[in-house]
Image (cartoon, rainbow, N blue to C red):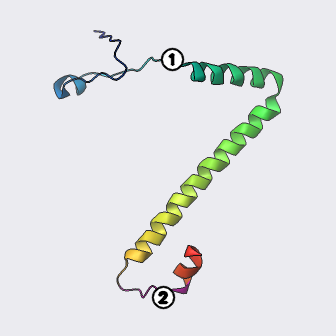
């Protein structure tokens, strides 16, 4: 059974939502431009595509590292047993 709608963000009742899979087939101009540009770059200059993928991987790893450091710092700040001013490792990490 297929249900289609022209609403940009349809709202279904919980009974319907838990029994169906909602698939969004909206196509936007910017997404098509990105895909076309990616195809052209891949065909014309593969080294640029490789560099882009490496940079995206590095950015993703950096974001994950930042989140891990934030979680560790917050955990240490929430620890009541540690005096914040005497914890040199925490002060270095905050700096």
Q: Residue 80: where, in percent of width, then height? A: 34, 82
Residue 21 or residue 33, whichever sits in front: 33
Q: Residue 56: where, in percent of width, then height? A: 66, 42
Badge 2 local density, few (<14 within 10 Å), some, or many (20+)? few
Question: Which residue sits at x=70%, y=44%?
Answer: 55
Up the image or down, 61 lies above or below 78; here it is above
Residue 50 or residue 82, whichever sits in front: 82
**Mark number, residue 37:** none
22 relative to 46 in the view: left or right = left
Q: Is residue 61 magenta?
A: no
Looking at the rendering, which quadrant does residue 1 occupy?
A: top left
Q: Residue 86: where, in percent of width, then height? A: 49, 90
Question: Which residue sits at x=33%, y=10%?
Answer: 4
Q: Residue 7: where, in percent of width, then height? A: 34, 16
Tell me the residue that label 2 is attached to.
Answer: 85
Q: What span is colored magenta in the figure?
A: 81-88
Up the image or down, 68 lies above or below 17; here it is below
Looking at the rendering, which quadrant does residue 18 occupy?
A: top left
41 relative to 27 in the view: left or right = right
* Number of callouts: 2
Question: Which residue sits at x=80%, y=29%?
Answer: 46
Tell me the residue that label 1 is attached to.
Answer: 27
- Element marked by disc 2: loop
Up the image or down, 90 lies above or below 12; here it is below
> What secondary structure is the stretch in magenta mostly built from?
loop
- Element marked by disc 1: loop
Q: Is residue 83 magenta?
A: yes
Badge 1 local density, few (<14 within 10 Å), some, or many (20+)? few
35 relative to 88 in the view: left or right = right
Question: Which residue sits at x=37%, y=75%?
Answer: 78
Q: Earlier in the sequence, mark 1 or mark 2?
A: 1
Residue ranking furthest to the left: 15
């Amino acid at each position: 059974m297929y249900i289609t709608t022209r609403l940009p963000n349809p709202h279904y009742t919980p009974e319907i939502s838990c029994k169906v899979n909602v698939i969004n087939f909206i196509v936007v101009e910017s997404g098509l431009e990105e895909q076309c540009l990616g195809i052209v770059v891949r065909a014309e200059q593969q080294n640029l595509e490789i560099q882009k993928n490496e940079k995206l991987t590095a950015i993703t790893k950096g974001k994950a590292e930042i989140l891990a450091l934030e979680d560790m710092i917050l955990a240490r700040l929430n620890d009541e047993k540690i005096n914040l001013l005497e914890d040199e490792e925490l002060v270095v990490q905050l700096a």
